[in-house]
Amino acid sequence: MISECEIENLELVYKKPKTLTETPMHYCPGCGHGVINKVLMEVIDELNIQDKVVGAAPVGCSVFEYRYMDIDMIESPHGRASAVATGVKRVNPDLYVFSYQGDGDLAAIGTSETIHTVNRGENILMLFINNAIYGMTGGQMAPTTLIGQKTSTSPYGRTVKNSGFPINMTELISKLDGAYFVTRQAVHKPNGVRKLKKAIQKSFEHQKENKGTCFIEVISNCPAGWGMTPIKSNEWLEENLIKMYPLGDIKVPK
Amino acid sequence: MIRGTINIDTEICKGCELCIIACPQKSIGLSNNINSHGYKYVELILDNCTGCINCALVCPDSGITVYRQSKNSLKKNKYLVAKL
Ligand SMILES: Cc1ncc(C[n+]2csc(CCOP(=O)(O)OP(=O)(O)O)c2C)c(N)n1
Ligand code: SF4
Ligand code: SF4
Ligand code: SF4
Ligand SMILES: [Mg+2]
């Protein structure tokens, strides 16, 4: 190993955010959830809002994220994180409130809550982690699963005939008047991580000004559920998922 | 060239190798050693890190801390050299 004292005048330029706890994460090696949890805490550190923010955690692989985020959090019933966040925000309008949900959670069992939260223009940040699969329960097909994608419940690949089309939830909710800022990001590359951070910062700024729902989809990997190494999973994400779900802003404030 | 270095928490590292791919300098490699959780971990293998923080950004387990030579110190060194 190279020793660090060989170079003089070293300055600290990156360390993990202080609002991320020391608890080791339970996520599989290379899982995007870890990066997203971390970036969210970085923003909370930089805005200095650790005691002014409440998160609604989902059911899914990120179910234990309240162990990693040193902020007030509520564990929501499956699919209902945006409804829980609605309640928190309405009772405490001065707090920053976010929900964090997977695609099975937000785009399957929670479809109704998702649509109506955005339609009401609830003044919260909704984070939607799309890995095109039910990660936690063993890699079953999700509404977001691609055509031809093999999962434990579509072992020969998803077909339109049996399961319909992959749902583009973010495009769909962007058409609702309550949606103020809607964007799709990914964290498989360093620049993507930087962009996600900016999007989260912007969303909290909009929330401070009571602008309405900010919705960030993050295209993420699931090496375990996809049956790939982390590196391979990020290549597959780039070649397939991002084609179906292109990155960039979908609705920006006028 | 600005020089930097990283510190890897080898007990937190799960050996996912995403930092290896993210490093433009190819400074990081997978070690043959295994930590107490049973994961191979990564280490700095080349002395050419620039402190760009790419590896730390993509690390899902927040196991990397990055240091970089301060720009001021570079200027100061140059000045000293010029004086000598
Ligand atoms: C009411 C209810 N129905 C079903 C489940 C089983 N269940 C747990 S997590 C999950 C889906 C998780 O997928 P996703 O939301 O995409 O999260 P990921 O693990 O992929 O991050 C399901 C169906 C449950 N816990 N509760
Ligand atoms: S099952 Fe998939 S989403 Fe869940 S922790 Fe493992 S890699 Fe991440
Ligand atoms: S800081 Fe940049 S150059 Fe140094 S190891 Fe990390 S990615 Fe490589
Ligand atoms: S990205 Fe993090 S967890 Fe993965 S190999 Fe590198 S240091 Fe280890
Ligand atoms: Mg999922």
Image (cartoon, coloured by chain):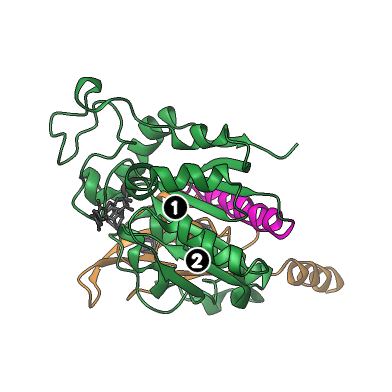
Chain colours: A green, B orange
Between A30 and A99, which is closer to the camera in this rendering?
Answer: A99
Cα distance in 3D space between marks 1 and 2: 37 Å
Residue A210, placed above or below residue A55: above
Corner quadrant of residue A53: bottom right
Q: Is the residue at mark 1 from the same chain as the one at mark 2? A: no
Kind of element beneath mark 2: strand
Q: Spot the residue most to the right.
A: B83
**Subunit of label 2:** A
Check if residue A192 falls in the magenta segment. Answer: yes
Corner quadrant of residue B71: bottom right
Residue at the image point whose x is 54% and y is 69% from the top: A54
Check if residue A148 falls in the magenta segment. Answer: no
Residue A76 spot, x, y in % from top left: 38, 63
In the visual, does A62 lie left or right of A43? left
Local crowd at mark 1 within 10 Å, few (<14), some, or many (≥20)?
some
Instruction: Please tell me the numbered disc located at residue A55.
Output: 2
Q: Amino acid at mark 2?
A: Gly
Residue at the image point whose x is 48% and y is 42% from the top: A115
Q: Which residue is mark 1?
A: B26
Specify start and end residues of the magenta stretch as a single range: A187-209
Q: Amino acid at mark 1?
A: Lys
In the visual, does B9 lie left or right of A12? left
